[in-house]
Image: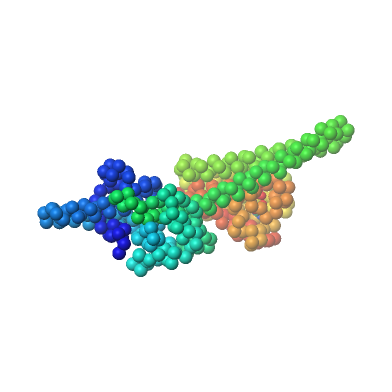
C-alpha cells in the first residue's frame, strides 16, 4: 500500500499549529480547508518517524505513544468523516490514496476497492479528472467549478461543486500528491442566477416608464404651444408613467425591507383579532371597490386571533383584494375570510373574476411574473404584489397557496401557524 494510505491509517500526533511551529510551516501548503487537511495528513506522516523513534524507547513508553497515536488517528478520521465537503488525496502517479465518506458518496465510489486505483479509471466526470491532473501538475492552489449529475436529494438539475486542489507534501517537504476538496455550491449558484434575473427584470420594468416619460416630454418640447389639448394628453402620460415608476420603486423597497427584516428576525408579532385585520384591509380598498362597483365581504369569527404583524398582514390582504378587484368584471363581489384549519390559520381572498390558467399557477408568486403583462400594466400593476404577499406569509412562518381556473375566479390564501396565536 502506498505511503499516504499508511499516513491516514497511522494516527496523527500533533495539532496543525504545533506542526507548523516545529516545521516552520514548510511541511505543507496551508490554504483553506485543503490546507488544513494537508496539515493534518502531513501530521500523520510526521508521526511515523516519531513512531520509529519510539521503538527504541522502553516498551511502556511505546505503548503509551501508540495509544496516543490511535486516539489522534480516530479524531482525524472522525473529522474527515463528518465533513460535508468531499475530500480526496491523490498520489503523484494519480492513484487514489484516501477519500472521506462525502467524496465516496459524491463520486459513487466504494473506498476499500477504490483506494490504490488510478483516478483516471475511477472518476467518470471529465472535468474533475482533468482538474486532478492539473492539480498534480502545479505547485499552486487551484480551483474551478465542476458540474455533477443531479441526485434525489437536490432535485432534477445538476449539482455545482467548487473544487480546490492543493499540494500534499510529506515531512521532508517532498511532494507526495494533491489534496482535492469538493464543496457543494449548488444553492449559492442558484441564488446568484435568481439575483441576476431579478436585476435584469427590475431594470427592464423601470426602463419602460422612463422611456415613455422621455418620449412624451420630447414630443411636448417639439410641439410646445401648438396644441394645448395634445399637450395636456402628453402631460397626463408623463404623470401616469411617473406614478408607475413610483409604484415599482415603492414595491421593490417594501419587498427588500420585508426580506431583510425576516432574515434578521426583526418582524414584531403580536396577538391580534383577524376580523380587525380584514376590516382595515377592506377599508383601504373601499374607494377602488366603489369605482368598480364591487362589494367586499368579510367572514371571520369575532374572537379569532393570531400572533401577527398587523400592518404587514393588512398589506398582504390589501394586495390580494386589490388583485381580486382588478381581475374581475365590474359589479363583482370579493369575499375575504379567516378561519382555523387544523394547525393553521387560513386567510383567504376569493373572487369570481378572470381566473388563472393552470400553466401559470406554479410561477404566479414570482417577482414580476404576470399572465398578461400589457393588461397588468394597463391596470397599474407592478407584478410584485403577490411576491410581497408571499414574503409576508414567510415572515409569519407561513406560506401561500392559490386555487384558480380561467373564468371561474381565484382563491388566494395565506397560511400561518395557529400556534402563534
Ligand atoms: P400585478 O401588479 O401584475 O397585479 P401581482 O404580483 O399582484 O402583480 O400578480 C401577478 C399576476 O397574477 C397578475 O399580473 C395576474 O396575471 C395574476 N393575478 C393575480 N391575482 C389575480 C386574480 N385575483 N385573478 C386573476 N389573476 C390574478
Q: Residue 231: x, y in percent?
A: 83, 35
Q: Residue at x 40, y 57 (%)?
A: 86
Q: Is residue 354 left or right of residue 126?
A: right
Does residue 226 appear anywhere in the picture? yes
> In the displayed image of the protein, which residue is found farthest to the top?
225
Number of disc labels: 0
Residue 128 lies, in percent from the top left, at 47, 59
Q: How is the image coloured?
A: rainbow
Residue at x 40%, y 51% (from the top left corner)? 166
Residue 39 in sight = no
Across and down, in percent, residue 247 comes to 65, 41
- Direction from residue 138 to residue 49 in the image, left or right: left
Image quadrant for the N terminus? bottom left
Residue 32 appears left or right of 356: left
Q: Residue furthest bottom?
A: 113
Q: Residue at x 28, y 42 (%)?
A: 21
Quick one: 350 or 65, which is closer to the camera?
65
Query: Residue 395, percent across and down?
Result: 50, 47
- Looking at this view, is 107 or 322 the one in front? 107
In this rendering, would 307 be left or right of 9?
Answer: right
Q: Residue at x 69, y 42 (%)?
A: 207
Query: Please, is residue 172 above or below residue 216 in the view?
Result: below
Q: Pick the residue in front: 186 or 251.
A: 186
Amino acid at each position: 500500500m502506498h505511503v499516504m494510505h499508511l499516513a491516514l491509517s497511522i494516527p496523527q500526533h500533533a495539532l496543525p499549529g504545533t506542526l507548523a511551529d516545529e516545521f516552520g510551516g514548510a511541511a505543507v501548503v496551508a490554504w483553506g480547508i485543503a490546507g488544513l487537511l494537508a496539515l493534518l495528513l502531513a501530521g500523520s506522516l510526521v508521526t511515523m518517524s516519531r513512531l520509529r523513534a519510539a521503538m527504541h524507547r522502553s516498551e511502556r513508553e511505546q505503548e503509551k505513544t501508540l495509544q496516543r497515536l490511535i486516539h489522534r488517528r480516530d479524531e482525524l478520521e472522525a473529522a474527515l468523516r463528518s465533513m460535508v465537503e468531499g475530500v480526496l488525496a491523490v498520489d503523484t502517479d494519480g492513484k487514489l490514496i484516501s477519500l472521506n465518506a462525502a467524496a465516496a458518496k459524491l463520486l459513487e465510489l466504494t473506498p476499500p476497492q477504490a483506494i490504490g486505483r488510478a483516478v483516471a479509471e475511477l472518476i467518470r466526470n471529465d472535468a474533475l479528472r482533468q482538474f486532478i491532473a492539473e492539480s498534480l501538475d502545479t505547485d499552486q492552489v487551484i480551483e474551478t467549478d465542476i458540474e455533477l449529475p443531479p441526485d434525489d436529494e437536490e432535485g432534477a438539475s445538476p449539482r455545482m461543486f467548487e473544487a480546490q486542489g492543493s499540494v500534499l507534501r510529506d515531512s521532508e517537504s517532498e511532494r507526495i500528491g494533491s489534496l482535492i476538496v469538493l464543496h457543494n455550491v449548488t444553492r449559492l449558484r442558484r441564488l446568484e442566477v435568481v439575483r441576476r434575473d431579478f436585476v435584469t427584470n427590475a431594470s427592464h420594468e423601470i426602463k419602460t416608464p422612463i422611456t415613455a416619460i422621455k418620449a412624451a416630454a420630447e414630443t411636448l418640447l417639439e410641439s410646445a404651444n401648438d396644441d394645448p389639448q395634445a399637450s395636456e394628453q402628453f402631460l397626463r402620460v408623463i404623470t401616469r408613467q411617473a406614478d408607475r415608476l413610483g409604484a415599482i420603486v415603492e414595491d421593490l423597497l417594501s419587498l427588500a425591507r420585508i426580506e431583510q427584516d425576516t432574515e434578521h428576525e426583526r418582524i414584531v408579532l403580536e396577538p391580534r383579532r383577524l376580523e380587525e385585520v380584514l376590516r382595515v384591509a377592506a377599508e383601504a380598498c373601499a374607494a377602488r371597490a366603489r369605482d368598480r362597483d364591487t362589494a367586499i365581504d368579510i367572514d371571520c369569527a369575532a374572537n379569532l386571533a393570531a400572533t401577527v404583524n398587523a400592518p404587514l398582514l393588512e398589506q398582504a390582504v390589501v394586495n390580494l383584494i386589490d388583485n381580486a378587484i382588478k381581475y374581475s368584471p365590474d359589479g363583482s363581489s370579493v369575499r375575504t375570510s379567516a378561519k382555523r384549519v387544523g394547525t393553521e390559520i387560513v386567510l383567504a381572498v376569493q373572487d369570481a373574476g378572470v381566473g388563472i390558467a393552470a400553466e401559470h399557477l406554479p410561477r404566479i408568486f414570482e417577482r414580476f411574473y404576470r399572465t398578461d403583462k400589457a393588461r397588468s400594466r394597463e391596470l397599474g400593476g407592478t407584478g410584485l404584489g403577490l411576491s410581497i404577499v408571499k414574503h409576508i406569509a414567510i415572515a409569519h412562518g407561513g406560506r401561500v397557496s392559490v386555487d384558480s381556473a380561467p373564468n371561474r375566479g381565484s382563491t388566494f390564501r395565506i397560511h400561518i401557524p395557529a400556534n402563534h396565536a
